[in-house]
Amino acid sequence: MILICPHCKKRHDVDEKRIPANVKMARCKYCEQRFPIRPSEKAVEQAGEKVPEAKDGPRRISISLSKGGVGKTTTAVNLSMGLSIAGFKVLLVDTDTQGQVGFMLGVTLRAGLLELVTRELAAEDVLVQARERLWVLAGGKSLAGLKRLIDRKDFGGELTLTEVLAPLESRFDYIIVDTSPGWDPLIVNVLFYVNEVLTPVSLETMTLQGLVEFLKNLSIIQKYNKDISLKYVLPTFMDKRVKKSDSIMKKLEELYGEIICEPIRYNVRLSEAPAYGKSIYEFAPGSKGAKDYRRLVRRVAGDDELLR
């Protein structure tokens, strides 16, 4: 018997024979909400009705690379903001202990992911609406405690993030997860949760090494999370004045072909915008940085007419 939770859209395969005749309600193991038990697919088909398909839910994208200084948070913020401007509902999750997402958007975030995982606060108390159609779930220094909490779990520690974010999915079209450099239990959690990875790669030789190491680790995760894939490699800090930029760009195109995005050009406006708590579209809408991130939004959303 297939039950579909109307709250989080998760499917549950249940043995119909084990459900007592007088029981009319079920509780979702993902979001813990109660919902009416629906008739089995077999019974529905016999009645001549079409079985409804479960919705796929939001697209879940992590912005990840083991190396720092490649523009992960800048990309997470401006991709999320661009998608929200384009009309999508977006949740931006900060899993970096530096907690820069709130600063870059000019919002104060006093609680966030840790409090949601520990159930100290409900989702309504930790989700902050930063802009129209854009919500933020804070990271910051408290995530060090979350990593310890994950480490102490005997089983299922890698699904901690999935368990707390799954109940929120029905509210959003995109869930974008900003990650920290390095490799730790929290980034493993992120990669067990998302199904798409966008990797910013600054056009420097050392970053290419970091990309290779990250992809090795990602391949290990893919043995357990079959749905995850590297969807986008985004070259950043493209500077035509620097010879190595062109050569590294060509190397990336040779190695990764169709998943290479058009590069984000070096633009001082991108580094200035966070000081004003603004996205690049708000701070310098006519800049190269704004144009490049609009182009990325169109690529990710698969719609060439967005943000024209």
Image: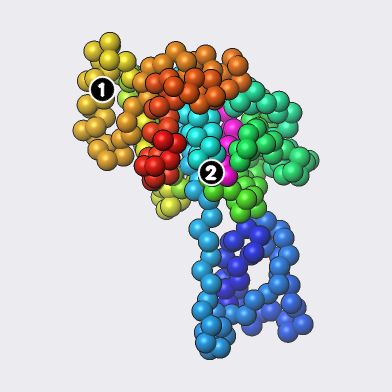
Towards the viewer: 305 or 30? 305
68 w.r.t. 41: above or below = above
73 w.r.t. 31: above or below = above
Percent across and percent down for residue 121 are 77, 41
Q: Is residue 97 magenta?
A: yes
**Residue displayed at 28% across by 10% down:** 241
**Residue displayed at 50% across by 30% down:** 78
**Residue 291 relative to residue 140: left or right:** left
Range covered by the magenta-colored residues = 89-98
Percent across and percent down for residue 99 are 62, 25
Q: Mark 1 points at which residue?
A: 248
Secondary structure state at the residue bearing disc 2: loop
| Sooner in the amino-acid sequence: mark 1 or mark 2 | 2
Which labelled disc corresponds to residue 87?
2
- Which image quarter: residue 23? bottom right
**Residue displayed at 43% across by 48% down:** 228
- The amino acid type, in three-letter code, at marker 2 is Gly
Q: Is residue 274 magenta?
A: no
Q: Can residue 111 be seen in this view?
A: yes
Percent across and percent down for residue 222 are 41, 47
Percent across and percent down for residue 159 are 58, 48
53 w.r.t. 221: above or below = below
Q: Is residue 118 visible?
A: no
Local packing at callout 1 (Cα closer than 10 Å; few below 14, some 14-19, many 20+) is some
Mark nearest the camera among 1 and 2 is 2
**Residue displayed at 26% across by 22% down:** 248
